[in-house]
Image: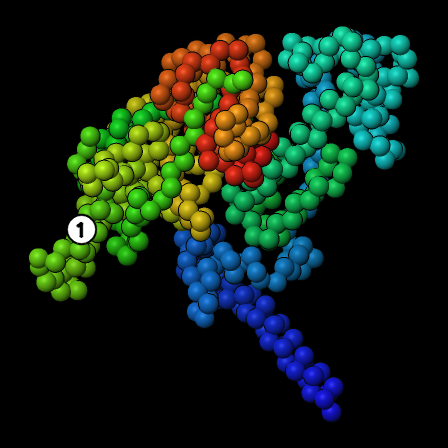
C-alpha cells in the first residue's frame, strides 16, 4: 500500500512538472495570437509587436518575460515547426593563403588543391591533410620558407620545423573557426530567432537550425555576409547633445507621438563601461527621466492623479526623442546633473532601439547632425536583465571608410593585467596597421576609438597615449567571458 501511495505521489508530481513546462508554451501562443490579431496579416507589424513586449512580464503567475517564456517553451524542432537547416564551412584554404601572404610557390598551392580533394574522402582535418600533401610533393621543402612573413615573425622563423609551422596554422584555423561560430551566434541572436540550434560538427563545419523562419533568403544573406571588424573615431557626448535637443524639437514639430506610459531610465542606476587603450608590453539641463522624477517628488503641490497624468503626457509630447532615447547624464559630486564624458550619447530599452533608428533615418532629423555622424548600438546590454543598450556616436572620415579594419590585426588574445588581476585584451598589428594605429591614437588621445563588428560596437576604449609599434592593450572591468569574446572577434 505504501508503494502504491508513493507511485501516485510521483505521478502527481510528474504531471505538475509537465503542466508547468507546458504552461510556457500556452503563454507564448496566447501572446503570439494577440500579435497576429494586432498585425492583421502584416509580418512587420507582428514582429514589431513581439519585439516591443520581448522584455515585458507576460506570465500572470510568475511575472516571467515573453523572452524567457519563449526560451522555456517546448521546442517543436524543424520537423514539426518547419524552418531552415544550414551547414556552413570555414574556408581554411583562404586562411592559409592569407597567412602565407598569398605565396606563389608551386608546391604550396598544389598541396592546398590536393588537400581539398583528399578532404572529400578523409576524416582528417584540412590542416593535417595539407601538411601530408606538402610532404608528398617535396619531402625536403620547408614550410618556414613560405610562412616566415613579417606578420608571423614572432612565431615562425626560417629555422622552424614543418611540424611547428603546421601547429601554428592549426591554432590559427581553430581560432578562425571559433570566431566564425561566435559571429554566427551573435548574428542569429540579433535577428531574433527563437530556440536556434548552432553546433560545431567538426572539420570546420557549423550546423545552424532555425525553427519557424519565414524569410529564408534574408537569413541566408545574413549568415553568409562577410564580417566587418572596423576601428572608428568617435564624437564626444558633449558635442552631440545640443544636436539631440534640436532633433527632439524637430520631432515635436512634426507631431511625433510616443506612449506616455513608457518607463523612464535612470542613468545613475546603470553602469557605463570605461575601457582604456594603452601602449602594449557643464550642463544644468535635465533629461526626461530627471524631469519626470522631479515632478513625481514635488511635494509642494498636492496634484491629483489626473494632473500628474497630464504632466506626464505633456513631458512626453515635448520630448518624443528622449522618451525612447535617454540622454547620457550623470550626477556629479555636487548632486548636479551633467553630461557624461565619452562617445555614449544615450541609452534605450531593446524594444525601443528600432524606433530610435527610424528617427535618425528621417531626413529632417539627419539634417541636424554632421554628415559624418553615424549612431551605432552596443552589442551587449549594460544591465543584468539584458534590456538596456548604449548608443555610440561614430565619426566617419571624408571617404566614409574605416581608417583601420580587421585585416591589420595579426594577433589578439586575453591576458591578465601586468599590475592588476583584471582581464585585458592584447592586440598586435602588421606594419601598415601599426602606422595607421600610431596616427589614429596620436589624433585621439583622451578620446575613444570604437571597435565595431557588423555595425555593432563591441568596445570603445579611451586612448591614454599615442601607440607606436602596433602592440596595444585594451583594459577595463572585463569578465573572463567578455575578454574571450572580444579577443576572438
Q: Is residue 299 visible?
A: yes
Give above or below for 65 relative to 403: below
The image quadrant that residue 114 belongs to is top right
Front residue of 344 and 69: 344
What residue would you read off at disc 1? Answer: 294
Whether residue 162 sits left or right of residue 335 in the image: it is right
**Residue at horizontal 30 percent and vertical 37 percent from the top:** 328
**Which color scheme does this rendered protein use?**
rainbow
Q: Position of residue 327 (x, y in %)?
A: 28, 39
**Residue at horizontal 25 percent and vertical 47 percent from the top:** 289
**Residue at horizontal 28 percent and vertical 46 percent from the top:** 323
The extreme bottom residue here reads 1
Quadrant the C terminus occupies: top right
Front residue of 281 and 317: 281
**Residue at horizontal 70 percent and vertical 30 percent from the top:** 174
Q: Is residue 454 visible?
A: no
Quadrant the N terminus occupies: bottom right
The image quadrant that residue 382 belongs to is top left
Q: Position of residue 71 (x, y in %)?
A: 56, 57
Front residue of 190 and 257: 190
Give above or below for 445 relative to 388: above
Q: Position of residue 47 (x, y in %)?
A: 46, 51
The extreme front residue here reads 419
Q: How many marks?
A: 1
Whether residue 417 sits left or right of residue 262 in the image: it is right
Whether residue 301 sits left or right of residue 37 in the image: it is left
Q: Position of residue 241 (x, y in %)?
A: 25, 32
The extreme left residue here reads 300
Crowding near the residue tagged with mark 1, few <14, some 14–19, many ≥20 C-alpha atoms within 10 Å: few
Give above or below for 260 relative to 357: below
Amino acid at each position: 500500500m505504501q508503494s502504491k501511495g508513493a507511485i501516485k505521489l510521483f505521478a502527481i508530481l510528474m504531471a505538475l512538472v509537465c503542466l508547468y513546462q507546458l504552461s510556457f508554451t500556452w503563454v507564448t501562443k496566447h501572446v503570439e495570437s494577440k500579435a497576429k490579431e494586432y498585425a492583421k496579416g502584416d509580418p512587420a507589424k507582428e514582429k514589431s509587436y513581439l519585439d516591443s513586449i520581448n522584455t515585458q512580464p507576460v506570465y500572470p503567475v510568475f511575472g516571467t518575460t515573453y523572452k524567457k517564456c519563449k526560451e522555456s517553451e517546448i521546442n517543436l524542432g524543424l520537423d514539426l515547426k518547419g524552418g531552415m537547416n544550414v551547414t556552413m564551412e570555414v574556408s581554411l584554404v583562404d586562411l592559409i593563403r592569407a597567412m602565407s601572404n598569398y605565396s606563389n610557390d608551386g608546391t604550396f598551392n598544389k598541396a592546398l588543391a590536393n588537400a581539398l580533394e583528399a578532404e572529400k574522402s578523409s576524416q582528417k582535418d584540412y590542416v593535417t591533410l595539407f601538411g601530408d600533401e606538402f610532404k608528398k610533393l617535396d619531402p625536403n621543402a620547408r614550410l618556414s620558407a613560405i610562412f616566415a612573413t613579417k606578420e608571423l615573425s614572432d612565431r615562425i622563423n626560417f629555422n622552424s620545423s614543418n611540424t611547428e609551422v603546421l601547429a601554428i596554422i592549426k591554432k590559427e584555423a581553430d581560432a578562425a573557426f571559433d570566431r566564425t561560430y561566435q559571429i554566427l551566434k551573435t548574428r542569429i541572436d540579433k535577428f531574433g530567432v527563437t530556440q536556434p540550434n548552432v553546433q560545431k560538427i567538426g572539420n570546420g563545419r557549423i550546423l545552424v537550425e532555425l525553427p519557424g523562419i519565414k524569410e529564408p533568403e534574408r537569413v541566408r544573406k545574413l549568415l553568409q555576409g562577410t564580417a566587418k571588424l572596423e576601428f572608428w573615431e568617435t564624437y564626444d557626448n558633449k558635442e552631440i547633445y545640443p544636436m539631440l535637443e534640436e532633433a527632439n524639437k524637430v520631432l515635436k514639430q512634426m507631431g511625433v507621438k510616443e506612449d506616455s506610459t513608457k518607463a523612464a531610465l535612470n542613468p545613475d542606476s546603470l553602469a557605463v563601461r570605461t575601457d582604456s587603450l594603452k601602449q602594449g608590453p557643464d550642463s544644468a539641463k535635465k533629461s526626461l527621466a530627471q524631469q519626470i522624477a522631479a515632478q513625481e517628488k514635488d511635494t509642494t503641490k498636492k496634484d491629483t492623479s489626473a494632473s500628474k497624468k497630464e504632466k506626464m503626457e505633456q513631458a512626453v509630447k515635448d520630448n518624443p526623442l528622449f522618451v525612447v532615447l535617454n540622454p547620457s547624464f550623470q550626477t556629479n559630486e555636487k548632486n548636479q546633473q551633467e553630461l557624461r564624458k565619452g562617445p555614449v550619447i544615450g541609452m534605450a530599452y531593446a524594444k525601443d532601439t528600432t524606433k530610435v533608428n527610424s528617427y535618425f533615418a528621417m531626413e529632417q532629423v539627419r539634417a541636424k547632425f554632421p554628415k559624418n555622424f553615424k549612431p551605432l548600438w552596443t552589442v551587449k546590454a549594460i544591465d543584468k536583465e539584458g534590456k538596456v543598450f548604449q548608443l555610440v556616436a561614430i565619426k566617419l572620415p571624408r571617404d566614409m571608410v574605416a581608417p583601420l579594419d580587421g585585416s591589420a590585426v595579426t594577433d589578439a588574445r586575453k591576458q591578465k593585467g601586468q599590475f592588476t588581476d583584471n582581464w585585458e585584451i592584447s592586440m598586435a598589428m602588421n606594419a601598415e596597421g601599426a602606422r595607421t594605429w600610431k596616427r589614429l591614437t596620436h589624433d585621439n588621445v583622451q578620446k575613444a576609438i570604437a571597435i565595431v563588428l557588423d555595425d555593432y560596437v563591441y568596445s570603445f576604449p579611451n586612448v591614454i597615449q599615442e601607440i607606436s609599434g602596433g602592440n596595444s592593450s585594451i583594459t577595463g572591468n572585463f569578465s573572463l567571458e567578455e575578454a574571450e569574446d572580444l579577443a576572438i572577434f
